[in-house]
Amino acid sequence: MRIFITGATGFIGRHLCERLAARGDKVVALVRTPGKTAKLPSGVEVFRGDLSIFADPKTVLPPSDVVIHLAGVVAARREADYAAVNHAAVESLLECVGRQDWKPRRFLFASSLAAAGPSPDNRAWTEEDPPAPMDPYGIAKAKAEASVRRAPFPTTAFRPPIVLGPGDEASLTLFKAARSGIGVCVA
C-alpha cells in the first residue's frame, strides 16, 4: 500500500512511518524542514513542501492508496494560526486531493478531543453528541472535521487524547517533574 503522510516528522508521524515501513508499505512523507528527514526510517520517500502547497492548483501529489493528515499546530502565538493551520490547510489538502487524477481509498484526519469539548454531565461522549469546543484550537479542529465529512472520497476523522511515549519532547517537562518527585493531581 502507498501512503502519503503530512506531519511525518512529528512525534506521532515518526512512529507511524516506522511502523508502516516495517510492515512493507511505501510511505511518502510531506517534509517542510529538510534537516528532519534524518528522523525518518530508510525507504521513506520525501515530498518537499509545507501545508501551503495544497492551495496551489498546480500541486500534483503522488498517487496514494491512503492519505493521513497528522500535521497541525497545538500551541500557537496567535488565534488566527489555529484556524489557518488546523482548519484552512485541511480544506486545502482535501481540495488538492480532490483535484488529483487519482482518489485515495481512505483519507485519515487526526483531529483532537478538544474538538469535542468537555463531556456532558454524568455520561461519556458518544458520536451523536455535537462538538462543543471551548478554545480556538478545538474550534479549528471541529471545523476541519466538518470539512473532512464533506469530502468526495472515504474519510475517517479520529480524536486522539494526549499522546505520550519515547521521543515525545512536548511532555518531557511532565516526566522530568515526576522524576524529581513533583506530582500532578487532576480533579
Image (cartoon, grey):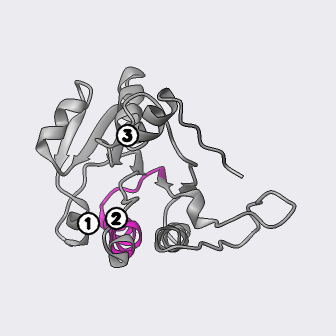
Disc 3 element:
helix
Is mark 3 in CB contact (under 8 Å) with mark 2?
Answer: no
Q: Amino acid at mark 1?
A: Phe
Q: Amino acid at mark 3?
A: Phe
Task: Examine the image and state in which quarter residue 122 appears.
Answer: bottom right
Question: Which of the two marks, 3 or 2, is nearer to us in this view?
Answer: 3
Task: Identify the residue shown where x is 47% and y is 74%.
Answer: 136
Q: Residue under label 1, please give it.
A: 54
Residue 95 within the magenta-colored segment of the rendering: yes
Where residue 68 appears, x then y in whole percent?
41, 49
Task: Identify the residue shown where x is 57% and y is 63%.
Answer: 114
Sequence-wise, the earlier of marks 2 and 1 is 1
Q: Amino acid at mark 2?
A: Leu
- Say if 181 sits above or below 30 in the image: above
Which contiguous range is marked in magenta?
83-107
Report whether residue 1 is seen.
no
- Judged from this view, the residue extending furthest toward the left is 34
- Say if 114 sits above or below 16 in the image: below
Is mark 3 in CB contact (under 8 Å) with mark 1?
Answer: no
Disc 1 element:
helix
Sequence-wise, the earlier of marks 3 and 1 is 3
Q: Residue under label 3, please give it.
A: 11
Is mark 2 in CB contact (under 8 Å) with mark 1?
Answer: yes
Left or right: residue 146 compared with residue 9: right
Q: Residue under label 2, please give it.
A: 93
Sequence-wise, the earlier of marks 3 and 2 is 3
Separation of marks 2 and 1 at Cα, in angstroms: 5 Å
Task: Examine the image and state in which quarter residue 102 appears.
Answer: bottom left
Separation of marks 3 and 1 at Cα, in angstroms: 22 Å
Q: Nearer the viewer, residue 16 or 100?
A: 16
